[in-house]
C-alpha cells in the first residue's frame, strides 16, 4: 500500500517506519531539523526489539509532491488537524482513506468536515514513542497496539484490510465495530492523565501516591465518563476501574501535555480537559475538575512555558 504520514513524530514516525520495513511505500511529511535529518541520514528507530534505520527514506514538507495514496495517517497535534486536513487533499484519490491517530475524540469529525464524509477512520494507539533527536525515534513501552473503525460502524472491509496490512508489518492491529466507544474509552484515561500531570507538574506516580491528587484524578475520570454516556457513547461498565488499575500498575509517566508545557510548546489542552468542559456544557453535565484544569492551563496554551 501507499501511505502518507502527516506528522512524523513519535507515533507517525514509528508506525510509518514499520510499514516501510514491511515493503509498503511510505512518505513522511515533516518539517525543520527532523525533516533535514531524515533526508540526510534516514530515519532511525530505537525499538524494544532492536534498532534499525530506514535509509534512504521518502520525506518531504511539500504534500503536493507526493500524489494520491491509499491511506493517510493523520498524526499531527490536535490544534493542527484542520490545517493538515486541508493540506492532504492532493493525496486523496477516489478510494483513499484518512486514519486519525490523535488524542481526544474530535479529530474524525474535524477531518470529515474538510475532506468529506466516507473517507475517515477514527483510530486509537497505545504506543509511547518520542523523537529522541532529529531523525531518531525511540519506542518507550511494549505496546504497538493500534485500533480503528468507521464513524458509523460496524467494522468494514477496508478497515479490516488495513488492520491486516499493519499485522503484516509486525504490529498489533484490529478493526472495531464501535469507533465512538473506542475513542472515548481511551479518552477517559487520557484526559485525566494529561490534565492532572500537567496541572500538578507531577508524574502519575506522584498522583497515585498522594490521596488528594488521587481523589481528584478519580473525579476527572468520572466526569469524562459522565459526558461520554450523556452523548450516547457505550462505555464499558468497568471503565473507571480499568483506568485506576492502569494508574496503579504502570510505570509513572509524564503525559505529553506536561512534556509540551515544560518545553514551552503550544498545548492541546483545549481538545483534552477543554473538550470535556465544552462537550459537558453541550449536554448539561457539570465538569468542575476538568474545567479547573482547563482554566489553570489556559495561560500557557500558546506555548508560553510553565
Image (tube, helix red, strand yellow):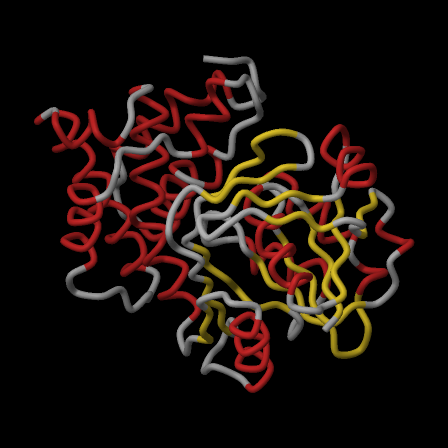
Count of labels in the image: 0
Which residue is at 56% across, 47% downward? 51
Residue 236 in the figure: left or right of residue 290: left
The quarter of the rendered structure image containing the N terminus is bottom right
For residue 165, above or below residue 7 = below
Judging depth in this view, the residue of 109 and 278 nearest the camera is 109
- For the view shown, which residue lies furthest in the front direction? 50
Which residue is at 24% across, 53% downward? 226
Residue 27: quadrant of the picture: bottom right
Judging depth in this view, the residue of 48 and 250 nearest the camera is 48
- For the view shown, which residue lies furthest in the bottom direction? 157
- For the view shown, which residue lies furthest in the left direction? 211
- Location of residue 77 in the rendering, given as x and y in whole percent from the top left corner: 59, 41
Residue 98 in the figure: left or right of residue 144: right
For residue 230, above or below residue 194 = below
Judging depth in this view, the residue of 69 and 149 nearest the camera is 69
- Location of residue 222 in the rendering, given as x and y in whole percent from the top left corner: 20, 47
- Location of residue 134 in the rendering, given as x and y in whole percent from the top left corner: 68, 31
Residue 20: quadrant of the picture: bottom right
For residue 207, above or below residue 135 = above
The quarter of the rendered structure image containing the C terminus is top left
For residue 268, above or below residue 305 = below
Judging depth in this view, the residue of 273 and 14 nearest the camera is 14
Amino acid at each position: 500500500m501507499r501511505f502518507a504520514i502527516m506528522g512524523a513524530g513519535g507515533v507517525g514516525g514509528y508506525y510509518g517506519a514499520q510499514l516501510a520495513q514491511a515493503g509498503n511505500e511510505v512518505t513522511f511529511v515533516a518539517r525543520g531539523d527532523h525533516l533535514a535529518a531524515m533526508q540526510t541520514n534516514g530515519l532511525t528507530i530505537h525499538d524494544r526489539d532492536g534498532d534499525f534505520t530506514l535509509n534512504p527514506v521518502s520525506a518531504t514538507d511539500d504534500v503536493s509532491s507526493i500524489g494520491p495514496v491509499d491511506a493517510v495517517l493523520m498524526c499531527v497535534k490536535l490544534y493542527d488537524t484542520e490545517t493538515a486536513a486541508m493540506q492532504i487533499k492532493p493525496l486523496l484519490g477516489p478510494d483513499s482513506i484518512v486514519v486519525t491517530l490523535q488524542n481526544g475524540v474530535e479529530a474524525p469529525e474535524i477531518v470529515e468536515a474538510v475532506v468529506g464524509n466516507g473517507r475517515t477512520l477514527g483510530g486509537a494507539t497505545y504506543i509511547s514513542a518520542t523523537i529522541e533527536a532529529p531523525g531518531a525515534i525511540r519506542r518507550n513501552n511494549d505496546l504497538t497496539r493500534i485500533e480503528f473503525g468507521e464513524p458509523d460502524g460496524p467494522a468494514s472491509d477496508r478497515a479490516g484490510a488495513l488492520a491486516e496490512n499493519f499485522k503484516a508489518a509486525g504490529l498489533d492491529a484490529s478493526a472495531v465495530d464501535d469507533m465512538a466507544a473506542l475513542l472515548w474509552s481511551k479518552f477517559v484515561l487520557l484526559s485525566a492523565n494529561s490534565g492532572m500531570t500537567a496541572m500538578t507538574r507531577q508524574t502519575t506516580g506522584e498522583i497515585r501516591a498522594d490521596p488528594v491528587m488521587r481523589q481528584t484524578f478519580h473525579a476527572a475520570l468520572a466526569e469524562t465518563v459522565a459526558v461520554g454516556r450523556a452523548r450516547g457513547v457505550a462505555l464499558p461498565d468497568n471503565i473507571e476501574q480499568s483506568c485506576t488499575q492502569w494508574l496503579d500498575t504502570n510505570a509513572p509517566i509524564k503525559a505529553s501535555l506536561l512534556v509540551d508545557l515544560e518545553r514551552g510548546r503550544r498545548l492541546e489542552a483545549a481538545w483534552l480537559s477543554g473538550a470535556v468542559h465544552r462537550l459537558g456544557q453541550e449536554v448539561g453535565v457539570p465538569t468542575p475538575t476538568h474545567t479547573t484544569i482547563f482554566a489553570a492551563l489556559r495561560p500557557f496554551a500558546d506555548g508560553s512555558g510553565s
